[in-house]
């Protein structure tokens, strides 16, 4: 029986999941492929560390270049994370004519252009299903299943940590610090959760998804990014009154007008969405992506976005696909992302959506009229107003306004103007409203 050798760089949670799946399904995979997938080397930093999966010490190495230099390894699986060391490994593998599987969203967001260019030059493949949404097959869907369609919008819950936190806040009314501590205790959040709660992780994933969906070339700094740490339990209560759920969304959408250049907007931020929408029911640490396309209309992919087995499953599916390509002598069967960008990224100032505005105001006559007047001066119309009475004399009064669709630049200018008024007692908080 023919054999295809692979080398796994990184033997943590995901690496252990990959090896477990390959072992558990070895017989079935051999039947399907007519060949055997053989793990020839595993590169890791700490060979003395206890692992959840037993492995022959003879195939372990602390020198990652052993994977690249082994002539019996055809596929290098990069699971070490980070950017610099991972890039050097992937680059060396591609230069040696080896195919690459990676789960590294940060690497692809930062150095994907160079990686894909080198892969084209060398005639080898780079697969990366696990780099966005773990076990949810969004990459394969965009690259293959919807290859004949034209995507018009993408809305995703692509970070399970933040979705777990926001679900707890919505369901139990917890402040964000309590919900975050619970996520850390249960293993859904890292000891340092900054990349998740800042929106940075979701922005990296959006760069990958937007490239496939629209032919965009994005870096994380091109994405309008806001995190969740400024959210308060009262925002969820207000949102419920207006019929909304609150999620951290990754959004990419075509904004092309007749005769203009093909453009998209790209942003990651908390957003209110209708309580009856597809994404509103995505709870806990789950991931989901809603795609809108011209032929198919709306469709949603849903599942676990992290963990040893879901992510390991996505990695193994890539290994299987690459094995088929190797056996049939057909690298490049699934094209890499376009070499040149097909769309421009629209400036963030031009984003248009509705807004939830939470003002903290003095309990004084005419305050609402003054705010409404300032909004009108900047072409922003009001859709709804809610104000709760304050029993404590002299205490700030919460005033919530929901606007009709407005331009981001106009809204920001109006808020800066309003916040200078002596009746405004705290910086105004805004949350965008999306129809997802």
Image (spheres, grey):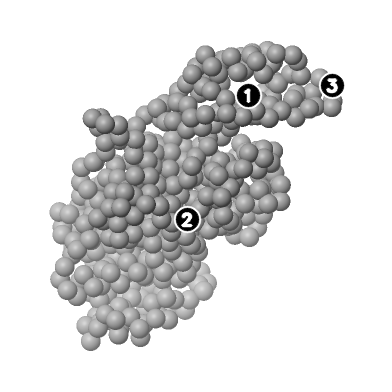
Residue found 29% across the figure and 81% down from its top: 32
Q: Are marks 3 and 2 in contact (CB under 8 Å)?
A: no
For the residue pair 154 and 73, the one nearer the viewer reads as 154
Question: In the image, is 117 to the left or to the right of 157?
Answer: left
Q: In this view, does 364 lie above or below 142?
A: above
- Mark 3 or mark 2: name the one nearer the start of the chain: 2
For the residue pair 93 and 257, the one nearer the viewer reads as 257
Q: Work out how far the residue at label 2 is from the one at label 1, CA to CA, in angstroms.
A: 33 Å
- Mark 1 or mark 3: name the one nearer the start of the chain: 3
In terms of secondary structure, where does tag 1 sit? strand
For residue 35, the mark is none
Q: Do the residues labelled 2 and 1 touch (CB within 8 Å)?
A: no
In terms of secondary structure, where does tag 3 sit? loop
Q: Which residue, given by chain and number where applicable, does mark 3 sit on? A: 393
Q: Can residue 289 be seen in this view?
A: yes
Question: Mark 1, mark 3: which one is toward the viewer?
Answer: 3
Q: Which residue, given by chain and number where applicable, does mark 1 sit on? A: 427
Q: Where is residue 379 in the image (x, y as percent from the top left)?
A: 49, 19
Q: In this view, does 137 lie above or below 107?
A: below
Q: Which residue, given by chain and number where applicable, does mark 2 sit on? A: 288
């Amino acid at each position: 029986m023919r054999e295809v050798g692979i080398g796994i760089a990184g033997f943590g949670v995901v690496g252990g999941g990959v090896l477990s799946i390959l072992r558990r399904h070895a017989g079935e995979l051999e039947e399907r492929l007519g060949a055997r997938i053989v793990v020839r080397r595993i590169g890791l930093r700490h060979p003395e560390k206890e692992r959840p999966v037993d492995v022959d010490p003879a195939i372990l190495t602390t020198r990652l270049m052993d994977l690249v230099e082994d002539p019996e390894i055809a596929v290098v699986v990069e699971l070490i994370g980070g950017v610099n060391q991972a890039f050097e490994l992937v680059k060396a593998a591609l230069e040696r004519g080896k195919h690459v599987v990676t789960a590294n969203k940060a690497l692809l967001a930062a150095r994907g252009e160079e990686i894909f260019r080198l892969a084209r030059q060398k005639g080898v493949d780079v697969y990366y299903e696990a780099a966005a949404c773990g076990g949810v097959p969004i990459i394969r869907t965009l690259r293959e299943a919807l290859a004949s369609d034209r995507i018009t919008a993408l809305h995703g819950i692509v970070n399970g940590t933040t979705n777990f936190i926001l679900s707890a806040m919505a369901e139990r009314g917890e402040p964000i610090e309590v919900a975050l501590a619970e996520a850390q205790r249960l293993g859904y959040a890292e000891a340092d959760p900054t990349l998740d709660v800042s929106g940075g992780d979701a922005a990296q994933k959006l760069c990958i998804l937007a490239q496939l969906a629209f032919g965009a070339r994005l870096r994380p700094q091109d994405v309008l990014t806001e995190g969740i740490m400024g959210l308060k339990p009262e925002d969820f209560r207000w949102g419920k009154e207006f019929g909304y759920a609150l999620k951290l969304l990754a959004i990419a959408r075509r904004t092309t007008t007749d005769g203009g250049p093909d453009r998209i907007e790209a942003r990651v931020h908390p957003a209110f969405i209708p309580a009856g929408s597809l994404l509103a029911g995505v709870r806990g640490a789950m991931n989901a992506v809603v795609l809108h396309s011209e032929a198919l209309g709306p469709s949603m992919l849903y599942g676990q976005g992290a963990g040893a087995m879901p992510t390991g499953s996505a990695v193994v599916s890539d290994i299987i696909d690459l094995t088929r390509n190797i056996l049939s002598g057909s690298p490049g069967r699934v094209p890499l992302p376009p070499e040149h960008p097909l769309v421009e990224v629209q400036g963030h100032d031009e984003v248009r959506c509705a807004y939830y505005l939470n003002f903290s105001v003095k309990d004084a006559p005419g305050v609402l009229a003054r705010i409404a007047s300032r909004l009108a001066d900047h072409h922003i119309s009001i859709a709804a107003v809610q104000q709760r009475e304050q029993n404590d004399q002299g205490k700030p009064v919460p005033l919530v306004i929901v606007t009709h669709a407005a331009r981001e630049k106009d809204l920001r200018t109006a808020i800066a103007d309003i916040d200078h008024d002596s009746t405004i007692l705290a910086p105004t908080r805004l949350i965008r409203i999306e129809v997802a």
